[in-house]
Image: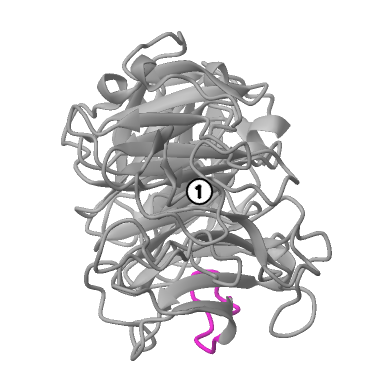
Amino acid sequence: MLRTLAASALLATCATSQSLTSIPVASGLTKPLAVTAPRTDPTRLFIVEQTGKIRVLHQGALLTAPFLDVTGLMSPPNGEFGLFSLAFHPNYGSNGRFFVFYTRFGDNAGVVAEFAVSADPNVALTTPRTVFVVPPSTSGDHQGGCLQFGLDGKLLIATGDGGSNAPGDPECDAQNGLSLLGKLLRIDVDGALPYAVPADNPFVGNPAYRPEIWALGLRHPWRYSVDRLTGDLYVGDVGQASREEIDFLPAGLGGLNFGWNSMEGDLCTGYAPCAGAPPCLSSSFTSPVWHFPHTLNHCAVIGGNVYRGCRIPSLWGAYFFADYCSRKIYSFEVAGGVAVNFADRTAQLAPSSGTITQITAFGEDANGELYICDRTGKLWQIVPVDDCSIASYGSSNVNSSGSAALIGAAGTASICAGDLSLTDSQLPPNKTCLAFFSDTQQLPCVPFGNGTRCVGGAVRRMPAATSSAAGTLSIPFGAAQTALYGITENDTLYFQIWFRDPTAGGSNTNTTNGLEVVLCR
């Protein structure tokens, strides 16, 4: 068996790093089970609801209309049925293809279906193509259902052992090479229809195994992830009676057997051996890189992600995961196939307002920043403790719309996220507007045309834009702009928007109030 750390070290905390916290970024969701984003879109997050909808969080706003609704295709979302996951094709930016996993209405089989985005990036086309079908589970439990693309462009599908009316996988699906259950599968969605089997899958040509199998001996791999830098796989396999485990698969290494139902974590289960399967403690089994016992209210591991964002550089390479019942959140790193620098992150990540109650999944955005799905209807983001902020200030004068134009912002003040946009409301419709900024605040604001000037000192102008027919405006100030203007961490900028406004007896121009933005990493 491969080397694993002792479970008795579980509660040790030995990694020192940047201070963390968690902040709510969305609420009002219905049983969120997954969150992800295409690598080319830093402005959107896509949240999977078990009830059958995929919701879009765009620049911090949760859109009312769903991206996709498959409620008419799937089983009623009770227990372990419903919509489970979403994976964007590596070339989604150019081909618009994505894949979902749901349990099918009628027989509860697991379906991997392909869809495509419409001309509207917030709405998908509704015609599916069935790619792969996983046989119905024995008892309706242990569906697995997580989808991820490897760095090689092949689609990975996690399946559970199907549950049973008796414990311990008595059907021996996890060790049966001819069963698709209890496995990690790997297919090529760019090959022949409905899919092709990659030629380098480990059991191709072996009549005792399905050729789609990449790894076996799993009980309930509810959530797994691919390290976006290395391609290594981390599989959170939910245990049964005594152990929870994280399994580690180095990039490109298929054919590993993680031991269920003979083993649970590092323990022999005592269940009846499966015909032809290796015995407990066999060298044919691969031990988990981390495991922990059902003590201190632990009950079900929630596999997470390796941090590869840029806002928290001290945690680069740390793998985050959780336990469902205890609500504990942990991290470790893998060095030489061994888990090191274990840390209990629960206290750090406790939000200042509210509680992370029922963790169902972790996920990452286009930039590699991490999020936590809370089954109670919330989405949380893991962020560093810093002093970035966005706040409006000063006053503006009434314009020809009958109101005073107000400046605001969407997104965050993080240079790393690169998702800041200047927003404006209560403008006259269809008017030329010009955003400008400096590092000097003018307060109180002083007369300027028909409006006021709330930005002082030498200013820099941004390209002109036009207000909408509804009198609104959104101007990006993201990664491209921070690079263009040489903006760096800890800079404080003051923004304002000038616009043409032919009011009688004035200078035919007006302004918004001011916006202060303290930039952070």
Does the magenta segment cover residue 38? no
Question: Is 167 located above or below residue 77 in the figure?
Answer: above
Q: How many marks?
A: 1
User: Is 132 left, or right, of 27 in this rendering?
Assistant: right
User: Is 159 left, or right, of 271 in this rendering?
Assistant: right
Question: Is 43 located above or below residue 13 in the figure?
Answer: below
Who is closer to the viewer here, 346 or 103? 103
Give x and y (percent) for residue 386: 40, 18
Res. 509 visible in picture: no
Q: For mark 1, give the secondary structure.
A: strand
Give x and y (percent) for residue 151: 73, 50
Mainly helix, strand or loop, the magenta region?
Answer: loop
Question: Is 237 located above or below residue 289 in the figure?
Answer: below
Residue at image coords 77%, 54%: 152
Q: Which residue range is magenta in the image?
A: 117-128
Residue at image coords 50%, 64%: 86
Who is closer to the viewer here, 486 or 416? 416
Who is closer to the viewer here, 446 or 288? 288
Q: Which of the colour schemes (rainbow, by chain, secondary structure, one colour) is used?
A: one colour
Give x and y (percent) for residue 24: 29, 40
**Quadrant housing the N terminus:** top right
Task: Report crowding for label 1: few under 14, some 14 to 19, many 20 or more residues within 10 A (C-alpha).
Answer: many
Does the magenta segment cover residue 124? yes
User: Is 341 left, or right, of 80 in this rendering?
Assistant: right
Residue at image coords 41%, 56%: 34
Res. 409 visible in picture: yes
Residue at image coords 74%, 62%: 203
Q: Which residue is tagged 1?
A: 224
Q: Amino acid at mark 1?
A: Tyr
Give x and y (percent) for residue 170: 36, 64
